[in-house]
Image: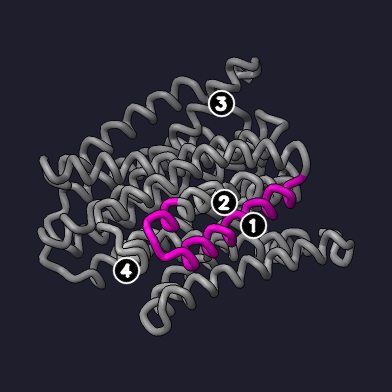
């Protein structure tokens, strides 16, 4: 392996993390530019929302085939293909003359981004034994993009328009592609069988029904449900419930993701030192505490303190994903990790709809109270498993 030294592996890890930064940033940037896009296309929030839903849906669907193709052809090829597709999609979005064209181009962006993460995470586990720490660094760079892209993109769009902002983001991603092409080693693929022979439906079904993985999928759906429900409406919640200015509310969301990006490597180290479940329990406890503060202290101080605690609680991606990796054999990590990511991301995507509907019909206390209740349910599952009832 061309990158078998400590320095080589670190360069590879940070090159992969930069790719995750770019692919996540390109998607979250679109959300930050929605106010500008609405005005230009003279459309409705429902129209833009449908386009964004398509992007996130195709992103989730591509996780599974990405893992299969990475097993067959090698992770490096899929990394480059995914980022190239995302870059092309971003350029086409910037040039889209209509809402329909905009929506179609978002599908390409989502597909390219969806090809990236499974092979990146699997390659990291092949280079590092400390899966929790290394995957947390990979995931943290994506969360960091949630702070950087919206803050810079929104401000730049005010002065230059949203299309040039997307073009600049695409240019940055081209630089990341060059870095990955230069730094990431060519690692032999895990599976050298033919592509047709590598697709085994019975094996996929058995994998999803394997008790340790099924248990972890249930946990993951709850975590993603929580993240989608909170992140989709957090600025709106701050404005309506705490009376915070809309611009400041958006900046606070960026701050939450910024704190999360710092907390994730710490959670990964915790999961390597103690256990995956210990890190996830701490994450749940922090999120539930943050919701109690946010809902119980209706003031700017409550919003700021609750937001900081929430950011520290949103540190679960690394330990959660490492929990999957630990329960997959090396030969099945590519397609297996992609498969479970598709399942739990689809399952958790309903968080936005559920929280939005409850906020409209019953208020924010009920909406975020349901999120907290789901997390408490996870704590119960952890407790039962800890007592040896499941041994999962």
Q: Indicate which label's residue lies in the foreground, 4 or 2.
A: 4
- In the image, residue 342 sits, relative to residue 261, either above or below, namely below
Whether pointer 3 and pointer 2 mark residues with C-beta atoms closer than 8 Å, the reply is no
Residue drawn where x is 40% and y is 45% of the image: 255
Number of other residues with Cα within 10 Å of mark 3, as a class: few under 14, some 14 to 19, many 20 or more: some
Distance from the alpha carbon under mark 2 to that under mark 1: 7 Å
> Which of the two labelled residues, at mark 4 and mark 2, occupies the earlier sequence position?
4
Q: Which mark is residue 313?
A: 2
Secondary element at tag 1: helix
Distance from the alpha carbon under mark 4 to that under mark 3: 51 Å
Whether pointer 4 and pointer 3 mark residues with C-beta atoms closer than 8 Å, the reply is no
Q: Which mark is residue 240?
A: 4
Secondary element at tag 3: loop
State the colouring used for the structure image. one colour
Q: Indicate which label's residue lies in the foreground, 3 or 2.
A: 2
Does the magenta stretch mainly form a helix, a strand or a loop? helix
Q: Which residue is mark 1?
A: 285
Residue 278 lies in magenta, yes or no? yes
> Which of the two labelled residues, at mark 2 and mark 1, occupies the earlier sequence position?
1
- In the image, residue 53 sits, relative to residue 322, either above or below, namely below
> Which of the two labelled residues, at mark 3 and mark 2, occupies the earlier sequence position?
3
Q: Which residue is mark 3?
A: 186
Residue drawn where x is 63% and y is 30% of the image: 188
Q: Nearer the viewer, residue 96 or 146?
A: 146
Secondary element at tag 4: helix
Distance from the alpha carbon under mark 3 to that under mark 1: 41 Å
| Residue range corresponding to the magenta coloring | 275-304
Whether pointer 4 and pointer 2 mark residues with C-beta atoms closer than 8 Å, the reply is no
């Amino acid at each position: 392996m061309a990158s078998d030294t400590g320095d080589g592996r670190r360069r590879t890890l940070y090159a992969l993390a930069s790719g995750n930064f770019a692919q996540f940033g390109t998607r979250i940037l679109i959300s930050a530019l929605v106010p500008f896009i609405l005005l230009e296309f003279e459309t409705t929030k429902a129209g833009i929302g449908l386009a964004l839903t398509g992007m996130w849906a195709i992103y989730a669907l591509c996780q599974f085939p990405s893992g299969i193709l990475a097993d067959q052809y090698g992770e490096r090829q899929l990394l480059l293909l995914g980022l190239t597709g995302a870059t092309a999609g971003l350029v086409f979005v910037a040039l889209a003359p209509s809402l329909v064209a905009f929506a179609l181009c978002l599908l390409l962006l989502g597909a390219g981004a969806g090809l990236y993460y499974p092979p990146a995470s699997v390659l990291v586990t092949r280079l590092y034994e400390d899966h929790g720490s290394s995957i947390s660094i990979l995931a943290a760079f994506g969360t960091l993009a949630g702070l950087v892209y919206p803050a810079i993109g929104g401000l730049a769009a005010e002065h230059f328009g949203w299309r040039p902002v997307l073009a600049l983001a695409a240019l940055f991603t081209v630089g990341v592609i060059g870095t990955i092409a230069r730094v990431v080693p060519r690692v032999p693929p895990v599976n050298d069988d033919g592509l047709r022979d590598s697709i085994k439906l019975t094996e996929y079904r058995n994998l999803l029904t394997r008790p340790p993985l099924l248990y972890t999928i249930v946990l993951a759906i709850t975590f993603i449900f929580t993240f989608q429900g909170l992140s989709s409406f957090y600025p709106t919640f701050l404005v309506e419930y705490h009376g915070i200015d809309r611009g400041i509310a958006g900046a606070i969301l960026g701050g939450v993701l910024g704190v999360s990006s710092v907390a994730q490597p710490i959670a990964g180290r915790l999961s390597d030192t103690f256990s995956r479940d210990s890190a996830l329990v701490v994450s749940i406890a922090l999120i539930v505490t943050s919701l109690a503060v946010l809902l119980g202290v209706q003031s700017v101080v409550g919003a700021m303190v609750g937001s900081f605690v929430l950011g520290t609680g949103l540190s679960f991606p690394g330990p959660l994903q490492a929990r999957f990796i630990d329960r997959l054999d090396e030969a099945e990590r590519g397609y297996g990790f992609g498969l479970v990511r598709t399942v739990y991301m689809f399952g958790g995507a309903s968080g936005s709809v559920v929280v939005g509907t409850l906020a409209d019909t019953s208020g924010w206390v009920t909406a975020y109270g349901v999120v907290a209740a789901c997390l408490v349910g996870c704590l119960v599952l952890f407790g039962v498993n800890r007592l040896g009832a499941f041994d999962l």
